[in-house]
Image (tube, helix red, strand yellow):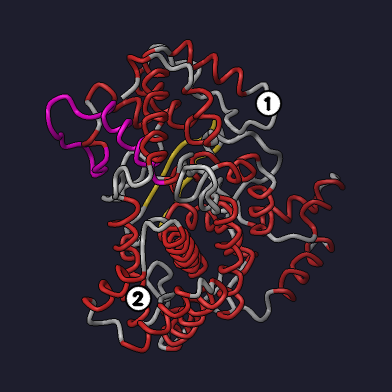
Amino acid sequence: MNQELQGYIEYVGKHEQNLSPYAIKSLDAVWIDGETTRDFYERLFAGRDTFKKNRYRWRTPFQLDRDSILYSSLFTRLSKKTQLYTGQGRVENRMTHTLKVAQITRSICRSLFLNEDLGEAIAFGHDVGHTPFAHEGERALNEWLREKLKPDHGQMELDDILILNKVSKGYQNSFKTYATYSNDSSDDFFSHGRQSVRLLTYVRKKIPDRYFTKNTLFGIWRHSTKAFDTDEKFSYKQQIDENTTFELGKDDASLEAQVVRLADDIAWIISDLTESIRSKILNLNVIREAFEKKTAITVTKDVEFREYLQREDQVSLYTYFITDLINQSKKNLEEVKSSENIKKWEKYISFSIELEAIVGCLKNIIEEYVISAKGIYRGDKINYERLMALCELYFDKPNDFLSDIEIANRDLNFPFKNEWYKKGIRDDKMVRALAIIDFASVLTDMEVARLSESVPQEFRI
């Protein structure tokens, strides 16, 4: 064995020797083109490229995934996308949210002896495909694309891919060629987790050498899909460039991905609650009344939680959720007799029954009183309309769309670089619609506000 390769294997092994048998080991990682980590490093250290050797020598594949995301313009732009409310003066944005998810993930992975590097890579990438204008932006892109691609005459039977039955027959061939979708029955036209994977692969700005492991991208895609039982059936396959056919499936699942799912829940629930209470959109009485109706929530847990919330003691709230999650997950994993028995697409990372009831109740409160409460904050409605109007203008006037892409790309850091759409954007309406979604999803709040100022009245809602 090459001496440099042997040294690398020993280096990684030493750092990961205390990992749980249920953790994903870095040397077992597979890149999206199917090459294994060991094969890649054997080829690397057999070569003469000193710079490339030094780039990879002291980092694991998952650290490289994290770095590729962290140093990208997709990540940088998260600081200019709001997390919940889209008006001025709000506290949380997508970047501060992502940093919290990453730190919560590290805390949980370390306590459970899981791979912190993989967890952190998933956490940093989980929202890079999120829309501008928070929930309103995601709703706008999904509704706009559904309207553009809907079937002309009812539902159609086509393969086993249910989302294809939602696409007009005239668009199906182009959709199958250019869209990113899976066999998940819950698939809709726009999902920010799936869009994150699409932007990092299919529509990415080209980067040198390796790019992304399948474990990292599985975790990013599936973080917003809460039904763990569907992970076993999940599959995705796409030709993303001339040389790469990219596949994901249950073998790419991990406990680290499960950690990010729930770390994300902890971060957004605490943030959304505290912002909503501070803005007087929610109050403690609403939460108390909802808790009283939920029989699974004990008096002790109720009092503890509402005491922390009333004091706006976010440190205690995070500790409260994280500690419960770690303790319950340890119990869950103790019941697994050996690493061979574990199925990493099944739910092992979880809250206790009592705290899970609180989490579920809080999600319902936020959905009912905040996210679904139309007009509760006037700026949200305006920003939804801005994004819809911009998409409509681009669809009706493809030359204006191409012009705005060209202007945006004068900034060398603008992430929408892949020109897959250039051949068909004028003639193929489906290609145009997908390109609009890709472009819109990387825009910041302020960019959409600026671009929508010139939208003629006939395209406005």
Q: Which mark is residue 356?
A: 2
Q: Is residue 182 above or below residue 441?
A: below
Q: Position of residue 210 (x, y in %)?
A: 66, 46
**Can residue 43 be seen?**
yes
What residue type is disc 2 on?
Glu
353 vs 337, left or right, is: left
Q: Is residue 205 above or below residue 33?
A: above
285 vs 258, left or right, is: left
Segment colored magenta: 135-163
Q: Position of residue 277 (x, y in %)?
A: 42, 62
Task: Classify mark 1: residues with Cα within 10 Å, few (<14), some (14-19) or many (20+).
Answer: few
Q: Please tell me how many numbered marks the rendered image carries.
A: 2
Q: Which mark is residue 126?
A: none
**Helix, strand or loop status at disc 2:** helix
Q: Which residue is mark 1?
A: 411
**Quarter of the C terminus within the rendering:** top left
Question: Residue at coordinates 70% horizontally, 42% vertically from top-left?
Answer: 209
